[in-house]
Amino acid sequence: MELVIITALVCLTNVICFIIGAKVGQRATNNEPITFPNPVKAVEEYRDNKEQREFQEQINTMLENINNYDGTGLGQKDI
C-alpha cells in the first residue's frame, strides 16, 4: 500500500514539473519575461489582507451596534 502511495506522489510530481516546464519554455520561446513570485511578499500580502478584513469586520460590527442602539445594551455585538 505504501508503495502505491509513493508511486502516485512521484507521478503527480512529474506531471506538475512537466506543466511548469512547458509554461516556462513557452515564455522563453516567445521572449516573454520569466518571473517567479516572491514567497515572502506573498505571505506579507496575505497577512495584510487578513488584517484589513478583520479591521473591516470590526468597523461593520461597530456600525451595526450604532444602528441597533436603543438606549440599552440589548442587541449589541461584542467587538
Image (cartoon, grey):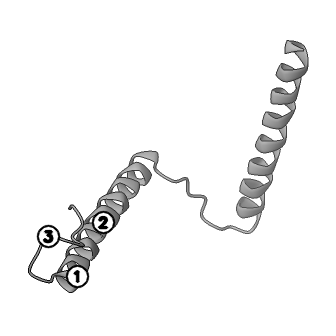
The dot on residue 26 is none
The dot on residue 52 is 2
Q: Which residue is mark 3?
A: 73
Circles 3 and 1: CB atoms closer than 8 Å:
no
Residue 4, given in percent of the width and then of the height, sits at 91, 20
Residue 6, given in percent of the width and then of the height, sits at 83, 20
Nearest to N terminus: mark 2 or mark 1: 2
Nearest to N terminus: mark 3 or mark 1: 1
Tell me which corner region of the image, top left, top right, bottom left or bottom right, holds residue 10. Answer: top right
Q: Secondary structure at mark 3?
A: loop
Say what amino acid the circle numbered 1 marks: Asn
Residue 50, given in percent of the width and then of the height, sits at 36, 58
Q: Foreground: 74 or 18?
A: 74
Left or right of 69? Residue 6 is right
- Residue at position x 76%, y 55% in the image: 25
Residue 44, given in percent of the width and then of the height, sits at 35, 52
Q: Nearer the viewer, mark 3 or mark 2?
A: 3
Image vertical order of residue 49 relative to residue 64, above or below: above
